Amino acid sequence: MRAGRSGDGPSRRMATNRRSAEEAQDTMNVIVLHGSARKGGDTDTLAEHFVRGLGGEEKHAVTHFRPIEMEIAHCRGEECMGCSAGKGCVVQDDMQAVYPVFRDADIVVMATPMFWGYMTSQLKTLFDRFEAVVSPTYFGNKDFVLLIGYRHYYGSMVEWLDRICEGFGSRSHALLCQTFDPETGQDVPITETPERLEEAFDLGLRIADASTAS
Ligand SMILES: Cc1cc2nc3c(=O)[nH]c(=O)nc-3n(C[C@H](O)[C@H](O)[C@H](O)COP(=O)(O)O)c2cc1C
């Protein structure tokens, strides 16, 4: 597994060997799942910089989903099991637009604040519905990218993603950004820590580079 971790220590960005977006490589399919209800907030901003690092929306096929604005029913599990016929999820709602984009994605971005120690409920509701398509076709050979804003804790999300990626031979990356100053007890908007945004950009750049090299 090629795993990336950054943001939970001092910035490691080097000013050297920065390549421009114009030099970015092959077109990739990118799905961005926005976990926050706050448009333009910390995690949206991280996602924006990550996509720029990849080479930008003009270079890649980038599709954004914002579950807070979508009709996505909860997975009803054993009470339904309509997916057991092997034809995907039988629930006809906005999730049906997500499945093919997720299947075809080279890069899956999950940009979420931590709420009660985990992803937000709207993102979890969306993810639960992937139960209907759990397979290497949907989960294999991808780069999964966590972009997290947190005050105190992010470990559950990192462990969760690592397990998925190990199971399917996909690659796990995480950018973990504390948007809180423990000394003052105040939230710190991500825009006030430009080094975090540069890390997001650099992560995108590294993944684009690695995809070209492979
Ligand atoms: C209702 C609420 C609950 C939160 N719960 C947690 C939490 O359990 N753990 C944590 O580390 N941060 C928590 N936070 C902090 C957010 O995860 C953090 O501020 C994040 O950067 C916000 O991202 P956004 O601007 O994209 O929404 C919480 C914030 C809010 C508003």
Image (cartoon, helix red, strand yellow):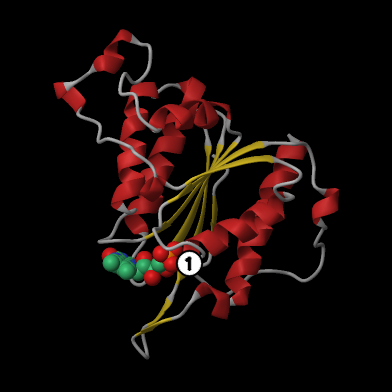
Q: Which residue does the image show at 36% across and 38% down from the upper left?
A: 127
Choose between 43 and 151: the one closer to the eye.
43
Choose between 201 and 160: the one closer to the eye.
201
Choose between 60 and 11: the one closer to the eye.
60
- Tell me the kind of residue under disc 1: Gly
User: Which quarter shows the C terminus?
Assistant: top right
Location of residue 190 in the rendering, given as x and y in whole percent from the top left corner: 52, 73
How many numbered marks, from 0 up? 1
In the displayed structure, does residue 116 sit left or right of residue 7? Answer: left
In the displayed structure, does residue 203 sit left or right of residue 120? Answer: right
The residue most toward the bottom is: 184
Quadrant of the picture in which ligand 1 is shown: bottom left
Location of residue 173 in the rendering, given as x and y in whole percent from the top left corner: 53, 49
Q: Which residue is mark 1?
A: 41
User: Which quarter shows the N terminus?
Assistant: top right
The residue most toward the left is: 79
The residue most toward the top is: 85
Q: Report which quarter residue 178 is drawn in.
A: bottom left
Q: Which residue does the image show at 25% across and 31% down from the upper left?
A: 75
Q: Report which quarter residue 126 is drawn in.
A: top left
Location of residue 63 in the rendering, given as x and y in whole percent from the top left corner: 58, 40
| Vertical order, 17 against 146 (above or below) | below
Q: Which residue does the image show at 28% across and 13% down from the upper left?
A: 84
Element type at marker 1?
loop
In the displayed structure, does residue 115 sit left or right of residue 134? Answer: left
- Camera sees residue 176: no
- Camera sees residue 110: yes
Location of residue 136 in the rendering, given as x and y in whole percent from the top left corner: 48, 22
Confirm or reject: label 1 Cβ below 8 Å from ligand 1.
yes
Q: Which residue does the image show at 40% across and 57% down from the upper left?
A: 36
Label 1, residues with CA under 10 Å away: few <14, some 14-19, many ≥20: some
| Vertical order, 173 against 130 (above or below) | below
